[in-house]
Amino acid sequence: MHLLRLKKAKPYSKLFNVPNLVTLMFDSVNFRLTRSDYNGADFLSEVPCYITDISEHHYNNGIVITGCLDNLKVSCNEYQIKIKDGSLCKWYLGDNLQTMGRKDTERAVEKLSDLLHLPIGKALITRIDVSQNFIMQHPPKVYMNHLGAMKNAARLEEPNSLYYRKQDCGLCFYDKAREQRDKKEPLPELFENRNVLRYEQRYERRIAKHLGVAEVRASMLYDEAFYIDLLNRWRDAYTSIQKINDVQLNFEIMRNKKDLNRMGVLALVENVGGLNAMMNQIAEAQQQGKLNKKQAYDLRQAVKDACALKDGLVVENEAIAELNKKVVEAVRFYR
């Protein structure tokens, strides 16, 4: 039996006076603990003692009890308990703008174990979001506008967010400060009147398969090797996104109307996310019958001719350079 802890949680950096380094955190985490994971568990009798807003649901295959543990939703039947649909960081630290790294995650799991009187460290992880909030020089939309195509992912742009969807997982970039204001939730002083860009990698199903392991248990979240692997995957996913660079006019090589047209094509290529993204769009149009074989060939040649001018014309966008640096630093200072 675990002892109940009533002390208010503090971020790891405040507990140990660690400098305010840029590092990653876990946000939404879903847990599932089964009776086989914890011999002798009587979920239907014990769990309701420790949760609020309890409801009992009767189905043909048995009883399900649902309730809450602050912002976390809890459900159980005679075979298992699930903890889901809430931010672990917000539950433990009070909001999900603070950074909850390995040590705070370990303390959060211990606290869950204490409150529910269950070994949550043994629970299977069925969803996990790896994220970071960046204080940026420009509004978040500026950075999203320079994030282009990603291989094997659908790109979905919304007014204040950008999504990349793959099967069972995805990436999300959004304006975190705006989200807080829209939800009428308080914004910590550190983030007031600042541009806050959030970047999340979400593993929503089949996590073990994506991570190349047999299973993912809660105790692995604070294992250093596992944590570093997640950080590297988070960085690599961002790196795999084609960046939309700036194109600057160079009048030393632009002598006539033809050169101007080629530079216009080059600007378009960069705007859609680079050469590969442009070629994919042409191929897709041909497959859909919008272009015949010769038209597609001519367009590909025009794109290749324009890209031959790339050196000296395409420069890294200042906003993307800033974001690239932030992502690299987040992994470098993982502790």
Image (cartoon, helix red, strand yellow):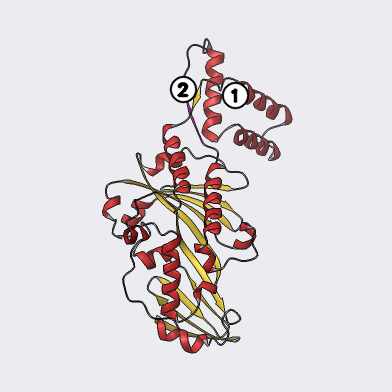
Q: Secondary structure at mark 2?
A: loop
Asked if residue 87 can be seen in this view, the reply is: no
Residue 68 lies, in percent from the top left, at: 41, 76
With respect to residue 32, does 104 lie above or below? above
How would you rate the neighbour count of disc 1 (Cα within 10 Å): few for under 14, some for 14-19, many for 20 or more?
many
Quick check: is 19 in the magenta stretch? no
Quarter the N terminus occupies: bottom left
Please count the marks in the image: 2
Residue 109 lies, in percent from the top left, at: 45, 70
In the rendered structure, which amino acid carries the disc numbered 2? Gln
Tell me, for residue 47, which label it has, or none. Answer: none
Where does label 1 land, which residue? Answer: 307
In the foreground, 68 or 303: 68
Q: Of marks 2 and 1, which one's residue comes earlier in the chain?
A: 2
Determine which quarter of the picture holds residue 38.
bottom right
| Label pair 2/1, CB-CB below 8 angstroms | no
Quarter the C terminus occupies: bottom left
Furthest-front residue in this view: 16
Tell me, for residue 248, which label it has, or none. Answer: 2
With respect to residue 84, does 190 lie above or below? above
In the foreground, 143 or 300: 143
How far apart are labels 2 and 1 at the CA level? 14 Å
In the rendered structure, which amino acid carries the disc numbered 1? Cys
Q: Secondary structure at mark 1?
A: helix
How would you rate the neighbour count of disc 2 (Cα within 10 Å): few for under 14, some for 14-19, many for 20 or more?
few
Residue 117 lies, in percent from the top left, at: 45, 82
Magenta stretch in the rendered image: 243-255
- Please indicate whether residue 283 sits to the left or right of residue 132 in the image: right
Asked if residue 150 can be seen in this view, the reply is: yes
Q: Residue at x 31, y 73 (%)?
A: 7
Majority secondary structure in the magenta region: loop
